Image (cartoon, grey):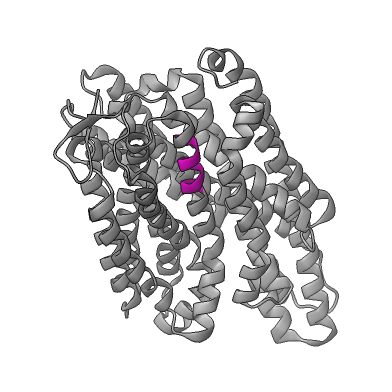
């Protein structure tokens, strides 16, 4: 069994004991890290127009400015999680904070697109180091099931709040300061987290580490990175570029090769046999689907609020607060739901609640649908917490780092794939449903139907009756695409809920999950 040194003493305690009297204070440090990682996934959305005006990036450079962070996070999680198990999870966490802080300052001071892309990639490396190690640290300092469930609920809520508050914070900063302030705000939080982590977070590691599989780490990083990149490009180009499909197939081949290699070598980087546990594998799948739907809904609503309803970046962030608060509440209350109804029922119920909310968006539209916002946030927050707890609870203590990496990979892949897949669905429906506008030239119509942002710009530049008609056509086409996208997500979540209800029955009975 792995051993964890107690904080503030020379005594070494096993993970089945209470490792530190300051575990809840230590949790606040871990939550601060995940809050930062979540914010940086979305805070840049409202700053993109300003960055485009001031740094003048090309189209591909702008894409890399936005995507390099998520790509780096998804690519490095398994490698960083296993390195933390081997060399010390606290060391990896503290190094991640340091990299994140330096990269935030570099991003704020960037004067060229290339500098900003490099800084964003470095931010992703720091975020990966924090995300991959914090689940394992929670597993070590909260060995009791009930306390660990509560801790994971609070920790998941921190990520949810970060993702949801990112546009609000970004809009507030952009309205009062320059675009670099959306990155510079990270630095004081990092300084406080480093000080708190040094004092409060105990070290833990696998005391019998295996030989580190560098080849496997490279295969997993390249495979995950290329798969996420391919899906993002499919969302951008609707599958019209063969090189995108080739990139995706290469990523899939690398991941298959990674799994085959892990099954054959005597000391694998990732114990793939863990996926034979239904709670482990199905929980990861539920997180991927639910978090993907949540982040896609957040992105699509932000677009509608700003481009169709005329909200400022700050106003759009405020309009999304019910979703953010409900998501954090669902994450924090998930242990109570599980204690009352059982984990299987609570997990399946959370998926169903989120699906019903998305169905309400499909039937009633996005405007003023605050009950659906609250339901979507509450259900998704509960699923994220219960799924995370199930993954960590099913893992062997000495391999908690790689289990945490699987969990966080589910989050990152869910975010990337959710945005790419549902964004592609919306784009296809938007273009096919954009009706011809009498009086508008062929160029105006083609430009307007290429994207909602382009339609808004063309309508404003054209003005008059034709401009109003272009704007109306864009709004109708977007809402139709929004309905199809949310309806598709609702169907997926219903299927996942049924799969969890049926598949977790037998495997959970003997462990008290039902």
- Residue 68: x and y, percent? 38, 59
- Residue 458 shown in magenta: no
Residue 24 in view: yes
Does residue 214 appear to the left or right of 484 in the view shown? left
Vertical relation: 245 (above or below) 476: above
- Residue 303: x and y, percent? 65, 66
Q: Quadrant of residue 350?
A: top right
Q: Quadrant of residue 236?
A: bottom right
Q: Toward the viewer: 253 or 13?
A: 13
Main secondary-structure element of the magenta-colored stretch? helix
- Residue 337: x and y, percent? 63, 35
At a point 39% along the width and 58% down the height, the residue shown is: 69
Q: Toward the viewer: 59 or 213?
A: 213
Check the picture and name the quadrant holding the N terminus.
top left
Residue 288 in view: no
At a point 74% along the width and 61% down the height, the residue shown is: 478
**Residues in magenta, as a range:** 148-156
Does residue 395 appear to the left or right of 476 in the view shown? left
Does residue 387 appear to the left or right of 225 in the view shown? right
Q: Toward the viewer: 119 or 181?
A: 181
At a point 26% along the width and 61% down the height, the residue shown is: 195
Q: Toward the viewer: 65 or 126?
A: 126
- Residue 402: x and y, percent? 33, 33
Q: Quadrant of residue 191?
A: bottom left
Vertical relation: 451 (above or below) 283: below
At a point 60% along the width and 75% down the height, the residue shown is: 313
Check the picture and name the quadrant holding the C terminus.
top right
């Amino acid at each position: 069994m792995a051993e964890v040194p107690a904080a503030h003493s020379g005594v070494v305690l096993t993970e089945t004991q209470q490792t530190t009297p300051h575990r809840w204070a230590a949790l606040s440090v871990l939550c601060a890290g995940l809050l930062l990682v979540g914010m940086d996934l979305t805070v840049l959305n409202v700053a993109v127009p300003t960055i485009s005006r001031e740094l003048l990036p090309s189209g591909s450079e702008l894409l890399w400015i936005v995507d390099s962070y998520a790509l780096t996070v998804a690519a490095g999680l398994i490698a960083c999680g296993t390195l933390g198990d081997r060399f010390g999870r606290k060391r990896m966490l503290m190094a991640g904070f340091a990299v994140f802080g330096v990269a935030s300052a570099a991003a704020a001071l960037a004067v060229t697109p290339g500098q900003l892309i490099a800084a964003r990639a470095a931010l992703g490396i720091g975020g990966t180091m924090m995300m991959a190690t914090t689940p394992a640290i929670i597993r070590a300092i909260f060995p009791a099931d009930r306390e660990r469930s509560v801790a994971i609920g609070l920790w998941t809520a921190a990520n949810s709040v970060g993702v949801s508050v990112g546009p609000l914070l970004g809009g507030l900063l952009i309205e009062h300061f320059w675009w670099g302030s959306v990155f510079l705000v990270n630095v004081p939080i990092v300084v406080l987290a480093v000080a708190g982590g040094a004092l409060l977070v105990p070290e833990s590691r696998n005391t019998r580490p295996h030989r580190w599989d560098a080849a496997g780490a490279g295969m997993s990083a390249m495979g995950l990175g290329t798969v996420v990149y391919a899906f993002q490009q499919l969302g951008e180009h609707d599958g019209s570029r063969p090189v995108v499909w080739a990139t995706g197939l290469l990523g899939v081949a690398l991941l298959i090769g990674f799994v085959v290699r892990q099954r054959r070598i005597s000391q694998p980087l990732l114990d793939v046999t863990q996926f034979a546990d239904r709670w482990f594998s199905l929980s990861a799948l539920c997180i991927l689907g639910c978090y993907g739907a949540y982040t896609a809904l957040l992105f699509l609503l932000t677009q509608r609020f700003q481009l169709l309803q005329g909200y400022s970046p700050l106003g759009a962030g405020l309009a999304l607060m019910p979703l953010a608060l409900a998501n954090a509440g669902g994450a924090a209350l998930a242990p109570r739901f599980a204690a009352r109804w059982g984990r299987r029922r609570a997990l399946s119920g959370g998926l169903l609640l989120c699906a019903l909310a998305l169905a309400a968006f499909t039937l009633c539209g996005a405007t003023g649908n605050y009950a659906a916002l609250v339901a979507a946030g509450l259900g998704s927050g509960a699923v994220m917490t219960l799924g995370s707890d199930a993954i960590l609870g099913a893992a062997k203590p000495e391999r908690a780092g790689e289990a945490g990496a699987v969990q966080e990979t589910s989050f990152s892949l869910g975010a990337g794939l959710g945005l790419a897949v549902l964004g592609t669905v919306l784009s296809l429906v938007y273009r096919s449903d954009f009706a011809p506008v009498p009086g508008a030239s062929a160029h105006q119509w083609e430009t307007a139907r290429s994207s909602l942002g382009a339609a808004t710009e063309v309508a404003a530049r054209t003005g008059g009756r034709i401009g109003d008609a272009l704007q109306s056509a864009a709004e109708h086409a977007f809402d139709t695409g929004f309905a199809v996208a949310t309806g598709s997500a609702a169907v997926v979540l219903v299927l996942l809920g049924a799969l969890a209800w049926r598949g977790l029955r037998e495997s959970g009975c003997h462990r008290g999950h039902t």
